[in-house]
Amino acid sequence: MQKGVVGNSIFKILAYVLVIFHIYTALFGIIGSTEQRAVHLALASALVFIAIKPDAKRGKKWFDWVLFVGALASAGYVFIRSDYLGNRMQYVTDLSALEMALGIIGIIVLIEAARRLMGWTLPIVVIIFIVYALTGQHIPGKLGHSGFDLMWIVDHIYYTPSGVFGVPLGVSATFVAIFIIFGAFLSATGGGQFFTNFASAAMGGFRGGPAKISVIASMLFGMICGAASGNVATTGSVTIPLMKKTGYEKHFAGAVEATASTGGEIMPPVMGAGAFILAQMAAIPYRTLCFAAIIPAILYYIAIYISIDLEAVRMRLKGMPKSELPPAWPILKKGWIYLVPIAIMLYMILSGSTPIKAGAYALVANLVLCYLRKSTWVSLKTLRAAMEDAAVGLGVVAVACAVAGILVGIMSLTDFGLKLTQLVAIISQGHLFIALILAMIVAIILGMGMPPSAAYIVEAVLVAPALTNMGLPPLIAHLFIFYFTVLSAITPPVAVASFTAAGIAGGNPMKVGWIAFRMALPGMIVPFMFVYSPGLVLMNTPINIAIAVVTSVCGVAFLAIGLAGHLHHKLPIIPRILMLVGALFLVAHGWIFGLIGFIMAVLGYFLYRLMIKNKNGPSLAA
């Protein structure tokens, strides 16, 4: 969905109603769970058909309005009849003709909304699953099922908590919604610009400073923004031109912003609102997840920071001149109002409040603080624009979660998830590493065509049970697949964050994508690291956690150096191989492997120094 929505009064009215509804229920308590989800879906999905134009040349046609009405009517019926639908005997009480029609319309509307928002990947997957539900009785072997008629399928998908109105949509209608609204208001009131200015003051003076500004600003804004490409568009419009001005090559500049922005979605405490979905799907306490995800996220950003620094060294880049650096104190003096809401949110979450309440209070604090000083006042027009942008974001997430709910419903109806778990076990022959590779491939493929939230939900149902059956704790299994659905945004050939950054940088999208992939590769090994070293997600004794952290930091650092291929000078082949192999030993499980890896990597470093010294003389040895 485009940010610049069609400016018609119907869209604006529904957008305002949707946002106010979510703010009200976050502050004063949600209505019944089914009613909450139905209102959320009815308004959010209906907005899709009047907020974008399927064909910019022709404008909206009559069938756009038919779909708009269908979205309101189908989900609206669930809202009106929620008590009846919740108390009836499912699969025994037949659906009426009206209920059948509205259920089918609701499913069709969601598939078309997903197509308009995300392209054909997710709709095709959904259609295949629906055909499977209708015809699976004709499939021989374990993948077949006993057969279900159309009424049973529609009932299960659209009128029970196992389908469209299940857990994924519930998370979207509560946790995710308030944080999307908070992020939109924070950006509209100047928070995004503050993070960029603050990062400039903190990191601009270091060598290659603008790239390091990008890392800090994108990380801070990205964990609230929740969309890698949106984060790139917001912070990248400032940081990419700065990087190019400093001397970074345009493709590298775009890759830095893409990797930094993508990482925001794995950075606690908000993790782009994905943490809330993960916590619900895996039945993990939210605070436990936040603490567990801290070290892996830091390792990801260490790898990026080292890659940036090495590139600055290679290109002999310096920091920004002091005359161009914004002074830190005035920025903090003016911008502390953007830090207070985040501090309130963190305090409330860590002290036991629900994330919904914490997000709502942070939102209120953001708005109140902006009106304490005339210089930070925001106009009514700006607030309305923030509400419209929030409604756009809500539409994307609501449709993604609802369509993912269709898949979840079919898998629970046909037991396909259990069958796929058995299939993964057969293919991997009980080897966890092979199962992890399969999970990684599926996550990246799904993530290329879906928002991370939808891709994660699908794989959480398809693959996570297979990993947990092989002995992985649910937290590690779900965090593993979540990482790769997020990192698919910078994984060629379809790397949406990299392509967005390439547009700003004026570079080749594929070239930006491959550079971003190389930079993020050490971070992509992190999920395998915490599978085999649970200390990285704080699931071990303090001494084992410390060992895992030290060896992993060293491993990620040497891996970034080896992949970059240079320090102050180009790495000769033998030292480079020693560093890369040593890095892989360092990130493996156990202190013995860590010690072997450390010795190899350090040996590679000193061999590099010796070779450079013999080649160029003592003065040039790094």
Image (tube, grey):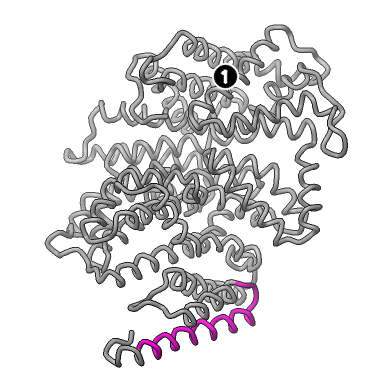
Q: Position of residue 230 (x, y in %)?
A: 39, 41
Q: Position of residue 196 (x, y in %)?
A: 28, 51
Total numbered labels placed on residues in the image: 1
Give the quadrant of the N terminus: top left
Would you say residue 252 sits in the magenta stretch?
no
Give the quadrant of the C terminus: bottom left
Would you say residue 602 sits in the magenta stretch?
yes
Pointer 1 residue: 109
Figure check: 482 above or below 99:
below
Figure check: 237 above or below 124:
below
> Is residue 49 rendered to the left or right of residue 618?
right
> Is residue 459 rendered to the left or right of residue 235?
right
**Residue sticking out furthest to the left:** 323
Figure check: 48 above or below 240:
above
Q: Main secondary structure of the magenta part?
A: helix
- Residue in view at x 53 percent, y 34 percent: 174
Q: Count residues near mark 1 (Cα–Cα under 10 Å), then give few for <14, some for 14-19, many for 20+.
A: many
For mark 1, give the secondary structure: helix
- Residue in view at x 59 percent, y 22 percent: 35
- Residue in view at x 42 percent, y 69 percent: 564
- Residue in view at x 62 percent, y 53 percent: 440
Residue range of the region highlighted in magenta in the rendering: 588-612
Figure check: 431 above or below 137:
below
Q: Position of residue 592 (x, y in %)?
A: 64, 82
Judge whether residue 162 can be spotted in this image. no
> Is residue 478 rendered to the left or right of residue 229?
right
Looking at the rendered structure, the kind of residue marked 1 is Val
Place residue 548 in its image quadrant: bottom right
Front-most of 621 and 35? 621
Place residue 326 in its image quadrant: bottom left
Judge whether residue 460 can be spotted in this image. yes
